Image (cartoon, grey):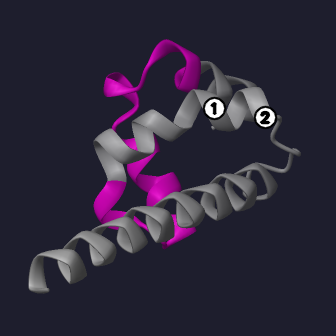
Amino acid sequence: MKARFLRCAGVRSRARRASTVGLFLTLFASAANAQGTQEQRRACTPDVYRLCAGEIPNVRAITACLRRKRASLSEACRSVFDQAGG
């Protein structure tokens, strides 16, 4: 019984985290003074998980984290920041 609960809790946690990242990416696009495209959101999602997952759900903290770790960003996400002037 406990194992099943833990599996369900893990699924809910992943679903919550995925929706939080989706929300972040939507807000991130607004914070960058541009409407983020699906392509731009897709470019930075892996970097958010890889480099800044501890900042979720704080949008400003995630954006600041990605800027601090610019040298570690994927080329795709770095180009999103270049386009946004960040």
Instruction: Give the SS element for disc 2.
Output: helix
Counting from the top left corner in percent of width and height, residue 6 is at 19, 77
Counting from the top left corner in percent of width and height, residue 21 is at 55, 57
User: 74 or 39, which is in the foreground?
Assistant: 39
| Callout 1–callout 2 Cβ contact below 8 Å | yes
Residue placed at 30% from the left, 43% from the top?
51
- Look at the image and say whether residue 3 sits in the magenta stretch: no
Instruction: Give the SS element for disc 1.
Output: helix
Disc ID at residue 38: 2
Amino acid type, residue under disc 2 in the picture: Gln
Up-down relation of residue 71 to residue 30 (above or below): above
Up-down relation of residue 31 to residue 6 (above or below): above
3 horizontally vs 55: left or right: left
Q: Quadrant of the N terminus?
A: bottom left
Q: Quadrant of the C terminus?
A: top right
Task: Name, please, the residue furthest toward the top.
Answer: 75
User: 6 or 44, which is in the foreground?
Assistant: 6
Task: Name, please, the residue furthest toward the left.
Answer: 2
Residue placed at 51% from the left, 58% from the top?
18
**3D distance between C-alphas at marks 1 and 2:** 6 Å
Counting from the top left corner in percent of width and height, residue 28 is at 68, 54
User: 67 or 6, which is in the foreground?
Assistant: 6
Question: Around disc 2, counting alpha carbons within 10 Å, would you say few (fewer than 14), some (14 to 19), or many (20 or more)?
Answer: few
Residues drawn in magenta = 53-78
Amino acid type, residue under disc 1 in the picture: Arg
Counting from the top left corner in percent of width and height, residue 8 is at 32, 74
52 horizontally vs 23: left or right: left
Q: Main secondary structure of the magenta part?
A: helix
Disc ID at residue 42: 1
